[in-house]
Image (cartoon, helix red, strand yellow):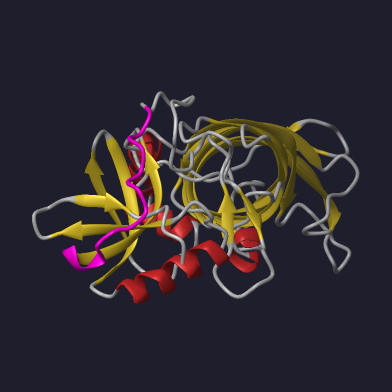
Amino acid sequence: MTRPISKILFIFLFVGFPASLTAQSNIQLGTRFGDNWFLGLSAGPTFFSGDLNTNRFLPQSGDWAFAGSFLFGRQISHVFSLRGQVLLGKTAGSKETKQDGTPVNLIFNSTVVDGNFNTMINFSNLIGGFNPKRAFFVYGTVGIGAAYFNTTQYSMLTNEVVPNTASSSNITAMIPAGLGAYYSIANKVNLGLEWSFRTLTSDMLDGVAEGFKLDMYSYLSFNIVLNLNKASKKTADVVDYKREGPIILNLPKCDPLPVPTSKDLMGMDKLPPPPSIGYDLDKFYLFKVQIFAFAQHIYSAETIRTRYHIPMPVSREYSDGLYRFTVGSTESFDEAKDILERMVNAGIRDAFIVGYTRDGERTSLRDLEF
């Protein structure tokens, strides 16, 4: 890569980061742009792989240095995230002889500043599915970036500086890739370990251009990440009733409430008493089964259907100060009873039938005995 192209990429990464940025919480994600962001810090050793490292991927004694980084990003889904990272540190290496015995006797250390943006893939959620109770995660990452480095070589024999072509400022493109794992504490703080490999499109990081066409350094980092999620309510626990029908999610005590019959914590006014038994069912042209009602507009029909795994469409309507959720829409009262029985057997025990007249009157039939 030519020097002008490298400089353009380097400037783009550091100036364009904020517009493109990731994923590390296991709660229901928010839908607004300001939701699902995180900030983090990391620190750890770097290991060089190139001409001045006989062991390639494994460092020799003293062939390691230290670096730190700042990272930030946004969670796109429970599997994919976008993340930006800026690293500042050093890397080092040494070599006494070549394979044929020719003496080299060189040591180098290099100051490195790199920036990259990458995609995180949460393997735990990808393979095992989303589980709100999961706290330990394994992930992979791959991206693109740029690196600046300034290298100094020393002679092993005299400890004097050896002039090299990498002693001036160098900018090159970089491809980062790695694996990591983290433990999430209450979906707010993540403690993690990540090993990433940063491959440069340059052979001059160690100041020697010979066998290795692409120099590389790895970064073993210990991370701490703060999730800035606004959608911070934990997902409800999953309860398997071990019978035919959908799995029901038990929501927290006040989130949501069943259909109220008296004034409660959400401030719902007492509902009018149900009509007496002895309805003329012929006056109703339509029957539905009501499953929930809320005083606040906090759930969509699709949210209720998905959360409760209801195998039929869910509708929402507003009347008398309540948002009511119903399933089924039939002219047959017997069919409405079948739908009600399915909901009750599935765990929605406060469900009941409502009837609609052609004049628009809505009547609760919850006190009928079948």
Point 38% across, 47% down: residue: 3
Horizontally, is 91 left or right of 132 in the view?
right
Is 122 or 301 nearer to us in this picture? 301
How many marks the image carries: the answer is 0
Q: From the top left corner, tell me how far across and down residue 230 is, in percent.
A: 46, 31
Is 19 or 127 nearer to us in this picture? 127
Horizontally, is 125 left or right of 321 in the view?
right
Q: Is residue 239 above or below residue 245?
A: above
Point 35% across, 70% down: residue: 336
Q: From the top left corner, tell me how far across and down residue 288 is, in percent.
A: 30, 62
Which residue occupies the extreme front position in the image?
A: 278
Q: Can residue 282 be found in the magenta stretch? A: yes
Horizontally, is 101 left or right of 208 in the view?
right
Point 33% across, 66% down: residue: 313
**Residue 286 in view here:** yes
Q: Quadrant of residue 290?
A: bottom left
Q: From the top left corner, tell me how far across and down residue 270 is, in percent.
A: 38, 29
Q: From the top left corner, tell me how far across and down residue 365 is, in percent.
A: 35, 55
Q: Can residue 163 be found in the magenta stretch? A: no
**Residue 173 in view here:** no
Is 30 or 102 nearer to us in this picture? 30
Q: Main secondary structure of the magenta part?
A: loop
Q: Is residue 280 above or below residue 158?
A: below
Which residues are the magenta region? Answer: 270-284
Which residue occupies the extreme left position in the image?
A: 359
Point 50% across, 58% down: residue: 308
